[in-house]
Amino acid sequence: SQKIEQNSEALNIQEGKTATLTCNYTNYSPAYLQWYRQDPGRGPVFLLLIRENEKEKRKERLKVTFDTTLKQSLFHITASQPADSATYLCALGQGAGRRALTFGSGTRLQVQP
Amino acid sequence: KAGVTQTPRYLIKTRGQQVTLSCSPISGHRSVSWYQQTPGQGLQFLFEYFSETQRNKGNFPGRFSGRQFSNSRSEMNVSTLELGDSALYLCASSRGLAGAQETQYFGPGTRLLVL
């Protein structure tokens, strides 16, 4: 069956370090993958989109990689700050006409000052 | 530009009742998707409406239904509420179909508690 896995345990890192979050999937052939940030009591906020033919995407301190062979995406936050503390969700899209995004369960990131 | 708004923000119902939730998308957005979020299951897709037509549907029972109006506003209805329906219900809007690599903009959600 189709499955998207993100680390269920919280990731705790020190301020200034690079946080790396993982999204693994099985039995999917995604056309693209998105990363969202969600703060408690709020809806997810879009961060980055990466397509199946792209290896890497960057936006300010954020970097996403997408390896369709490993069926994995890595999400990096460099020079992390306490304000980056939130839950990060990956979502897979299978293209136009298909079901809308399928989300992973998210990884909670805690950046310690 | 105003963001996605959802009403009400909080709701308490009892088993067997029905509930209607409302979502107003960002101006110009024609797609509205609904999701259910629970601690155990995460974010699960309910359905997507585009130009007043349901375009995609998730694996939820028929008790969950929705509709979209000509102004793109959307409502979802849950009939015969069960305890397990307690969740945060999120709607998201996008210009085009969500599956077409569109960025989705989420509302703050409606937190439903079924007693």
Image (cartoon, coloured by chain):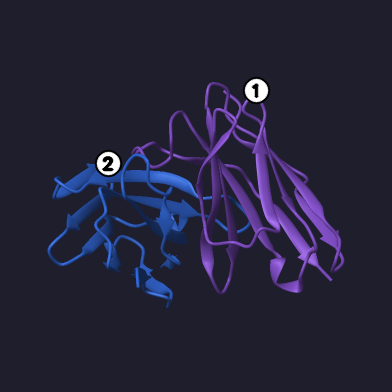
How far from the left and from the top, in percent, is residue B101?
A: 34, 39
Colour blue belongs to chain:
A
**Chain assignment, label 1:** B
At 38% from the left and 42% from the top, the residue drawn is: B99
Residue placed under numbered mark 2 in the picture: A59
Amino acid type, mark 2: Lys
Q: Which mark is residue A46?
A: none
**Chain bearing mark 2:** A
Q: Is residue B10 above or below residue A18?
A: above
Q: Is residue B97 above or below residue A39?
A: above
- Is residue A29 or residue A88 the one in the foreground? A29
Q: Position of residue A6 (x, y in %)?
A: 36, 70
The answer to which quarter of the image holds residue A60 is top left
Report the amino acid beneath label 1: Asn
Return the residue at label 1: B71
- Where residue B87 sits in the image (x, y, percent)? 67, 63
Q: Could you say where residue B81 lies in the image, as x and y percent from the top left?
A: 78, 64
* Secondary structure state at the residue bearing disc 2: strand
